[in-house]
Amino acid sequence: MTSGFRSEIAGLRAIAVISVVLFHLKITPFQGGFLGVDVFFVISGYLITRNILSDLKADRFSFAQFYTRRMRRIFPALIFTVALTYIAGALWCSALMFLDVAKEGTHALLWISNIQYWRESHQYFAPNSDELALLHCWSLSLEEQFYLVWPLLIVLVCRFGWTFAAIGLASVVSLMSAILISRSDPSAAFYLTPFRIYEFGCGAVVLLFEMRFQPSGRLAEALSAGGIVCIVASVVLITPDMPHQDIAALLPCIGAATTIWAGGQTNTSRLVASPLMIGVGAISYSLYLCHWPIIFFARFIFVAGADSAAGTLGQIVAMFALATGMYYLVERPFIQRHEFRSARLLKSAVTFWSVILVMAAITHATFLSRGFAWRLPKEQFELAHLQDYPASEDLAPLNGPIGVLFVGDSLVAQYIYGLTPLMKELDISYEASGGAGCPILYGVTLSRSLRREECRHRRDEALAWLAGRDQPIIYAQLWRLYDDSAMDYEFGPRETQSAQVHSYTRLQAALELTIGKIVARGNRVLLVGAQVDPGCSINLPRIEQGPLPRAPQHPCPPMARQEAERSIESIDAVLATVRARWPDKVTLFRPIDHFCDSNCPVVKDNIWLYSSRIHLSMAGSKYMIARNEGAFRNFLSGER
């Protein structure tokens, strides 16, 4: 069991962090650079297990000392990174974006980033990874969770002489579990600790090999060269969208493990452990921490300029300069050797947790206050709010009898918001039911979706709610989400079901069944047609300005009316067919007829009419309703 400084491990750290940085900078051909994190996990598994076993053998292991060392190693640079990211967010981010930065900071400080990102990946309004300033902290949270349980396991099994049997069993169970869970929940296999234990175990098992046999000569050369080739091949050949990522991750893990086992005396190891690589390896933790916030804010502040050659070079220089400063001024003072007396251990723990809890309180307060909107001029905040999607507080309950029911998915909110002034004028109130991203239709469920059961529950709840109501219904869904490839139809022979993308035979069958049941009870229905797709990605947090100026996001060009008609004709044909079956009970409202003239605008008078690619903003909702208020007035008042 080789102890002390290992130059080849420093070189592996350099390869791992460079791979991650190049991947996040989107530099070809390093599309598999995210696997550098897996190399870090192998290194951690090896070093942590080695140190625990060495201390146990010398009868000097202490849980208090172990966790204090981990805190001194991890927390200072992490706290510094979260603090800098928070300050940058306060200076440049709008309220909407700053509350997300603050929320991420809280989760990073409390070691739960990976759990939160996993939970959010299941949500309908899950943020894009480019919108998360501290996304990379998921791996630190996972590693910190590993540190909580691994020493307990090693100490327990070591007493019975089962150390490597237990490590092997834990690794196999972890890998098998990751393979199984990835079929139904890939994000769990990616983010959650139990499904990554096998990577740490891969490093720990190297210790067993070292005890039994230390390779030398040609074997060591082959293992060392083969290990580096495995890592480089995975970084170049594996892509983020490749299936079976859990199995693919074995390639860099095995590569890192064989490189460590081969030792530092091979030609390959000496090449990897050059002075430059050892230097990068030394600052690898600080470099990993600071690289993504720099990329995130560079792209946010300078937009397209950040991805130019000059912009990319500037980010690299900034990363290495900041990482070097963090290493010497933040990391190193806390990882120097200290005498670990009980009083010092307690003082260290109290100091670190005091700082963490104070910072977590600040970041959480920022989240609860909706991003400290007071940082912005009132007019700017009001404009930002107008360009947002209607939140629950924007959909206040109204006085008067229930005059209309809203049913559908998340599009319902934009119609409730836009029609609120008219409902107030008519002295009627409303009720709503449904679920974001869920088809509220008899006989269909989402297929191959993590939200399948949630949407089934939302569907059954909404349809049962409708069964006893006689008020008119406004039925709004983002119909293009529910083509035949996205839904299973529960009625009829399965062999007759079509699964063609952008075919809507199941939607039509389910709509006819649903509308038929509704109108049979005497309800009138306003069936809202297909919403116009703006044809470009809209990132609302990046649209809005913060206290300091930055390059604005260029508006999406308006889509030609003819092009928009072609994009929705198959859906509206289905809706028109359904409407024709009950012409006295069903009215078809086509948003395109009122939102578009010769073109379909995305921005009007410098105000964004969309809050995302699939949702109108509050300004967009007002714009569309105002252009056809008469049709809605007639429907709500009972006139044809």
Image (cartoon, rainbow, N blue to C red):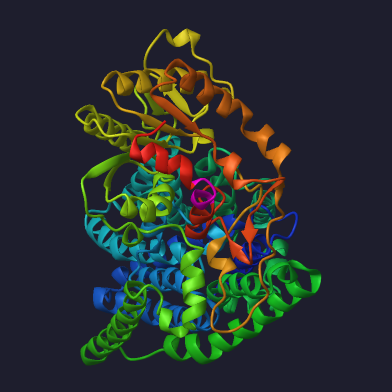
Question: Residue 165, position in %: x, y?
Answer: 33, 47
The C terminus sits in image quarter: top left
Decide: is 508 above or below 51: above
Residue 423 falls left or right of residue 252: left
The total of numbered circles placed on residues is 0
Which residue corresponds to the image point at 31% horizontal and 69% vertical from the top-left?
A: 57
Residue 120 falls left or right of residue 566: left
Q: Is 229 in the magenta?
A: no
Q: Which residues are magenta?
A: 624-628
Which residue corresponds to the image point at 42% horizontal and 7% vertical from the top-left?
A: 493
Question: Residue 227, position in %: x, y?
Answer: 63, 53
Question: Residue 136, position in %: x, y?
Answer: 51, 65
Residue 483 falls left or right of residue 447: right
Foreground pick, 327 / 230: 327
Which residue corresponds to the image point at 48% horizontal and 8% vertical from the top-left?
A: 495
Q: Residue furthest front?
A: 639
Q: Residue furthest right?
A: 309
Foreground pick, 622 / 78: 622
Q: Quadrant of residue 297?
A: bottom right
Q: Is 626 in the magenta?
A: yes
Foreground pick, 189 / 72: 189
Q: Is residue 135 visible?
A: no
Main secondary structure along the magenta-highlighted residues: helix
Q: Quadrant of residue 295?
A: bottom right
Question: Residue 8, position in %: x, y?
Answer: 61, 68
Q: Is residue 31 visible?
A: yes
